[in-house]
Amino acid sequence: MGQMGSITDVAGILVGHADDAQALTGCTAVLCPRGAVGGVAQRGGAPGTRETDLLRPMHLVQRAHAVLLTGGSAFGLDAATGVVRFLEERRVGFAVGRVRVPIVPAAVIFDLGLGRSDVRPDAAMGYAACQAATGSHKGSAWPSP
């Protein structure tokens, strides 16, 4: 069993992290393969986001399959591409005909003033965060595609 009070205590929620310790940046993926209803409250003078509008009510898409929190400022949003690819390989996503489109809202923080500003989370790091994802429940690690 995981740490009591952790988000991974919720059945079906997996969390993984990947980072570059020398560059002082990284990303965390919260995966919910069956989908989860979310919400968003955006604050700050220069928010960096991707697909967060899908979390607002009254949109066609009602569930997200992951949420990515990443460093790297606007550059770090590229890490969401790795999360989308990981989920697509496992056929997780919003059904659109024969295709499933993973819904992955993402938000960044500005960490370019720390570590190396030329190293940022990218698609490979987002994918690695998903590979590292685990949960508190039995069988809650992802199988290979």
Image: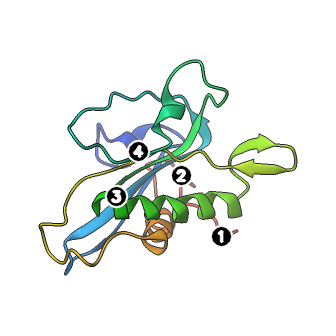
Q: Amino acid at mark 2?
A: Lys
The residue wearing badge 4 is 8
**Three-letter residue code for mark 4:** Thr
Which SS class for mark 1? loop
Spatial CA span between label 2 and label 1: 17 Å
Quadrant where the image shows the C terminus: bottom right
Q: Which of the two marks, 3 or 1, is nearer to us in this view?
A: 3
The residue furthest front is: 45
Q: Nearer the viewer, residue 90 or 49?
A: 49
Mark nearer the viewer, 2 or 1:
1
Compare marks 2 and 3 and give the one earlier in the sequence. 3
Q: Which mark is residue 138?
A: 2
Q: Which residue was labeled with disc 1? A: 144
Q: Residue at x 64, y 49 (%)?
A: 102
Mark 2–mark 3 Cα distance, whole angstroms, equals 36 Å
Residue 8 is situated, as x and y percent measured from the top left of the image, at 41, 44
Q: Residue furthest top?
A: 58
Q: Which element is circle 3 on?
A: helix
Q: Quadrant of residue 77?
A: bottom left
* Tag of residue 74: 3
Count neighbours of disc 3 (C-alpha within 10 A) and say few if under 14, some if 14 to 19, many if 20 or more.
Answer: some
Q: Secondary structure at mark 4?
A: helix
Rounded to the nearest whole Å, what is the CA distance between mark 2 and mark 4? 11 Å
